[in-house]
Each structure stands twice: as C-alpha cells, then as structure tokens.
C-alpha cells in the first residue's frame, strides 16, 4: 500500500495504546503529517489543517516534496494561507491509507493487515490523533484549526474535545452532524463496495480487488461533490468523439460519462476500499448533538473559540450551506465572533478545492485579521 | 414477466412493422393502456397521460381494476383530473415491462425474449406508440396531453411529431432535453446493473438475476427522486431499533437506510433490468434541440399548442424547475398561452406522486379553464 503515500511524508507515533471512542485500541499506531513555514519562538503562529475523506497530508509543495499538493492554490508563501507568516501542519486522517495507521496497515499483534479488525473509527478518534501531532510540535495553542468537508467535522471535534486548543476556527464545507441525504449517499457508496464479490468481506488482494464497487462509489462521490449547474456549462450534451466512445451499446457516449470514468480510474486503485468504508461510516456517525442531549446548536455553543468563519458553496448538495450557517450560528451562541459566508461557486461541495478566487479571499481576510 | 402487469390492462396492437427512430422495427408489437371516464360524442374531452420510467398504465382505480393506481390522488371522479368530465387514456411506455412490448417480451421472429436485440428505443418511439393508441380510440384531437417526468419528454415528442394532436399540454417535472447531472445519475444506475455479473450481458434468468445491480440502481433513483430537505424532517438522524438493525458492522443503522432498502426490495424483482436500461438510455438521448439546429428553445417554439402549463417542485434535483421554466418559455415563444409554476413541495422530483395538495390545484385550475 506504500504507493498511496506521497514522498516526504513525516510520521508521528501516537501514544500506545491509543484508545478509540467506541472501544478498541491501537498499539504502535502513527499519523502521517507534513508542515510548511516556521514555528515562531512562542509557538503562536501555528495552524492545523484537517482534511476530507481522501486527501493525504501533502496539501502543497514543501521542502520534503516539491510536487503540487491538493490545496496548492490556497497554501504557500503569499497565498491565502500564507506560509511566510504561518507554521502549518496538515494531518492525514487516522484510518486513511495515505500514511496514517488504518485498516490497510499491518496489525503488529498479528502481522496481518487490520482490514475489518481495525477498531470502529469515529471522527473524534481522528481529532485526538491530530491534536497529538500538534502537541508534539511544541504547540499548546493553535492560532486556527481549519477543516474541509469531513475535516470540518474533525475540526469541530478537535475544538470540543480539547478546549482552548485553538484561538480560532475556519470550517469549510463542513457540518456539525451528518444528515440523511448525505448518509444515504455514503451508505450507497459503501454498499457498492460491499456488494462487489471481490470485496470478499474485506479480504481482497491486488489481484482480486473490488474494482467495480470502488468505481461505483467514486462516481457517485464525484456526482455529489460537484453541481448540476457547473456540469450544464462544462459538459452540456456534448458527446464523445467516435474514437473515444465505447462500442458497447450501453457504454460511454456523453462527455460527462467519460469525466466520471476518468475520475473513477484515478481513484479505484489509489484508495484502500476498507479505509474508505471506515472513514465514510465515521462521517455518518458524527453528531455534535450527542454532546448536548440531542441539541446540535447546544453542542456547537459548548465549543469555546474566539473567532470563527464557516464558509461553503451555495451549490453544495452534500454539505449544504445551511450546515455552515448552523455552525456559525452555534459557535456565535457559544460566544465566538463567528461569521458565515455562502459563496456563489458553481462547483458544489468540491468548490474549496478549485475555486480559489472565491475561497481564497474569504480565508485570507479571516487569517489576516488574527 | 406477467407478474409485472396489473389486471384489467388493455392492449392496443401497433402497426406492424413499427419502425424505430434510430433504426430497427417491431413486428406484432402492442402497447398496454387503461382508460377512465366516457368519450363524448365529438371526442373532444380526451386527455392522454404518458408516464415516468417505471409506472404501469394503472394510474387510478377503474372498472377493470378497482385497486388504487399510482396517481390515485389526482385522477378520478371529482379529482383534479376529473373523470366525470374527461375521458382519460394512460399508456404504458413502449419498451416497458408492464404490458407494452419491450426487451422482456418474446420476439415473435425467434420465440425468445428480445433482451438486447430489442431495437434502440427513443422517447420519440414511445410518443408515436402512444398517439397510435389515442387514434384507435377515435380521437383525432386531444384536449390535453399530460406527461410526468420521462412522460414530460414523451409528451413534448407527441406534440412535436404530431402537430395539432392536442389543444393543450401539461408538463409535470419534465424537461426538453437531458442535462449532464441527470445523465450522470442514469449512467451510473445503468452501470450498476451492467456491472452486476448476474446481468450477464442481458441473459439473466429468475434464478441468476442482477439483484445487486438493480438494488443499487433503485436506491440511487430514490435518493435523486426525493430531496434532502424532506429527509431532514422525515428521518433526521433517527436510528433503527436494535431488532431492525443489521448485525453486519457496515449494515443498516439509520432509518433513511432502511427506507432505501425497502424501496429497493419493492422494485428489484418488479421491473425488468433490460427494460430499465432501454428506458433510462432513451431519456439521456432526448433533446428537442435536435429538431432545431441545436437550439432547444427553438425546438420548443416549433411546437404548436394553444395552452400549456409546466410545473415542478423547487426541490427537484433530477429535473430541476429551470427545465420546466424553459418549457413554458419555449412554448410561449411558439405562440402558446404558457405558464410556469414552481411549487414549494419538499418531496423533490417525486412530489407530483405525493403532494396532491400543491399539484392538484395547479392541474385542476388549468383543466377547468379548457
């Protein structure tokens, strides 16, 4: 599985044992991370980035790895997250296959991959692991914790479970609890993988691999990560050239189908299916209301942070902007100077990965004022 | 496949051969239909209903079959489509498995099911077949042609290919061309069926049946037929009782997952997979712009009808209301007295099947004024 991990990745050993929220524990586990910029003398310029389901810790080029990262447009010297000023830590989620310990890691107790013997993973476990990385850097208080998508959930868990860990928070296309439309989508993605006979109860190999299930899961992901509006303009009803089109009467015909196919091909063998199942399910389980007698607003209000920004794209169907509005309202009820911005990005949930023109200034303005 | 067909269904023999738009032809084909009400002496009170992908012709209870139909709340004596006044014909789509000739019908030339030897089906073929049923009833001019969802496409094809066939038109949650988001969803549904090894190139049997593929396709359908808003209120994060929940660690846990599972179970064995593929693909192909040098508005404007109503639900993500707005605008440009109404139904694309409180008055008001 080492082909999943970008060069230059650094590793932080978690306390051993590392206990999970829902029970079970890991021994000898670690978390992959990368850094940018320089920590100042009083360690007051540190930012933590926690990510969506699939990204690794390589958010942008750095000394360890000059290749562009998944947030290259946002992070670097002079960029919205200005590494001339900030020392930035990005953590690969616990349970991922991009360097952190997860279902695709060898269980030291057995010498075999964990697979489905990995403990039930919650967003909160990833949050605790990320904070452990931060503390090991000599940072006791972050200037800001920034979370995107699933990372928006992780960031809220960081703040809730570690009061005082951050002065501020930027929540990008995140949510304080999973709602049924997104649960339904993720449940169907997991079902596609589990129904693939080659998934084989998690005991697949490189030769017998749940290719079809992963392809379906990824295509459904991409469909819900973008927006109909963007696709109308981008693909319309344009058909593939005859040499690209499939001979199969039910094969690819429209450009949008080829786009999905391309995305699926670039994903299927580059993300571990069991890790996908664990991370996906952890999102369904996440609910700040659990910490406040079923009241999600009270859960948010129990988080203490000085300043917060919750932003998202108005076209997002997976983490709709009402959920970012709720985060801002809830944190404000808890005493934060909290702002919500719904951006007119056409790119849906994934807009934060591509629409730097809109997301960049919002993030820059917030960080500049810290 | 006779278990798919409601009792009391009537059959109309199509001209033989019946040629298809994209080539190929059927011999000895027929279309299933039902009627309500009484045709008046000058045959001026006739309405045609063309349906979405999966419904049969049994839209409501009638003499032949007292069981409630799929549009029971809308159609009947004193209802929005008042059968005391109107003579209503509802046609099961050509290519369906609910009584009309389709891929699950025996090909008289071979004595075997057509399966993938069925000719490539277009929306326009279904439209021509429906008009043939209408004419056989002694109707030369309909008071109104009403189409829902896919039937909204069929109705537009009826009007385009048979100028003068109807005085008016009600388009409900339909569209004048398939756009990439809906193409992507349908493409993925078809892929789920085709990737199921038991689909077997269309040669499945009752024993070796593409159960998983059909289940995935249906769940994805249901997700896109409804709306996030409705599900937030209806399911929230409510979990299944422990006796309903699955023991499987990745099995059903939330009510929304059980709801999808129930829908899938009621569909998988009650709709033929090959018919599903053909009808689904016909929607992707549909594009009124083909008839007007790539200009969909001009295609609509070439349709001659006196009055039209295009309605839909503001929460519809599959056939968004912008598409019904476009239909009204285009028909108006062609000289029709055309109105668009976007209804605040929370139920998404399927709202017309359940939200009679909103859809009923809109349809009734239009028909009463004819």
Image: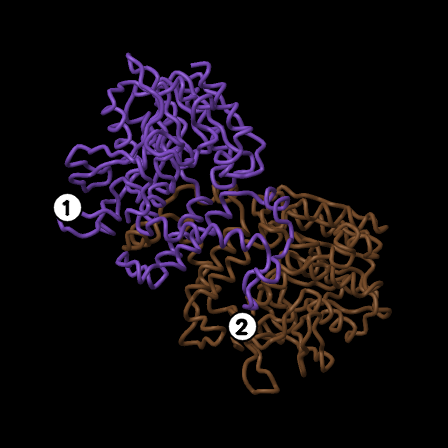
Chain colours: A brown, B purple
Query: Quadrant of residue B138 in the image?
Result: top left
Q: Is residue A2 above or below residue A241?
A: below
Q: Which of labels 1 and 2 is toward the front?
A: 1
Query: Quadrant of residue A120 in the image?
Result: bottom right
Q: Residue B108 carries which label?
A: 1
Residue on which disc 2 sits: A4
> Are the residues at dot 1 and dot 2 in contact (C-beta closer than 8 Å)?
no
Q: Where is residue B271 in the image (x, y as percent from the top left)?
A: 35, 48
Which residue occupies 60% across, 65% down? Answer: A279
Q: Nearer the viewer, residue A169 or B21?
A: B21
Q: Position of residue B211 (x, y in %)?
A: 38, 58
- Residue found at the far top of this picture: B42
Secondary structure under tag 1 reads loop
Question: CA gap, disc 1 to disc 2?
Answer: 55 Å
Q: How crowded is mark 2: few (under 14 residues within 10 Å), some or many (20 or more)?
A: some
The chain letter for the residue carrying disc 1 is: B
Q: Where is residue B364 in the image (x, y as percent from the top left)?
A: 48, 21
Q: How many labels does the image show?
A: 2
Left or right, A36 with reference to B173: right
Q: How crowded is mark 1: few (under 14 residues within 10 Å), some or many (20 or more)?
A: few
Which residue occupies 26% across, 36% down? Answer: B31
Q: In this view, does A37 lie above or below B58?
A: below
The chain letter for the residue carrying disc 2 is: A
Left or right, B359 with reference to A131: left
Q: Which of B227 and B163 is in front in this view?
A: B227
User: The C terminus of chain A is located in which quarter?
Assistant: bottom right
Q: Where is residue B222 in the image (x, y as percent from the top left)?
A: 48, 47
Using the rendered image of the protein, determine whether residue B91 is visible from the camera's viewpoint.
yes
């Amino acid at each position: 599985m080492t082909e999943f991990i970008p060069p230059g990745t650094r590793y932080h050993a978690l306390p051993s044992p590392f206990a999970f929220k829902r029970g079970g524990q890991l021994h000898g586990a670690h978390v992959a991370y990368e850094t940018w910029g320089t920590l100042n003398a009083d360690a007051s310029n540190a930012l933590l980035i926690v990510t969506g389901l699939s990204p690794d810790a390589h958010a942008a080029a750095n000394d360890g790895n000059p290749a562009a990262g998944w947030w290259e447009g946002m992070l670097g010297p002079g960029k919205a997250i200005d590494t001339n000023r900030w020392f930035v830590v990005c953590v690969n989620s616990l349970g991922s296959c991009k360097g952190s310990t997860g279902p695709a890691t060898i269980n030291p107790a057995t010498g075999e991959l964990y697979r489905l013997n990995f403990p039930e993973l919650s967003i909160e476990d990833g949050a605790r692991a990320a904070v452990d990385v931060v503390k090991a850097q000599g940072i006791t208080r972050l200037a800001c914790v920034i979370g995107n998508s699933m990372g928006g959930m992780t960031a809220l868990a960081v703040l809730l479970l570690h009061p005082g860990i951050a002065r501020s928070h930027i929540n990008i296309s995140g949510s304080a609890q999973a709602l049924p439309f997104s649960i339904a989508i993720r449940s169907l993605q997991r079902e596609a993988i589990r129904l693939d006979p080659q998934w084989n109860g998690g005991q697949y190999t490189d030769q017998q691999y749940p290719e079809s299930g992963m392809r379906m899961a990824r295509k459904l992901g991409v469909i819900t990560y973008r927006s109909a509006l963007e696709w109308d303009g981008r693909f319309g009803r344009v058909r593939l050239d005859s040499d690209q089109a499939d001979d199969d009467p039910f094969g690819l015909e429209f450009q949008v189908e080829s786009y999905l196919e391309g995305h699926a091909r670039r994903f299927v063998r580059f993300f571990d299916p069991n890790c996908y199942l664990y991370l996906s399910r952890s999102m369904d389980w996440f609910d700040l209301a659990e910490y406040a007698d079923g009241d999600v607003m009270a859960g948010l209000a129990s988080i203490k942070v000085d300043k917060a920004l919750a932003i998202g794209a108005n076209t997002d169907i997976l983490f709709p902007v009402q959920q970012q509005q709720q985060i801002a309202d809830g944190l404000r009820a808890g005493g934060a100077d909290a702002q919500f911005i719904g951006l007119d990005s056409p790119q849906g949930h994934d807009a934060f990965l591509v629409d730097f023109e809109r997301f960049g200034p919002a993030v820059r303005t917030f960080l500049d004022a810290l």
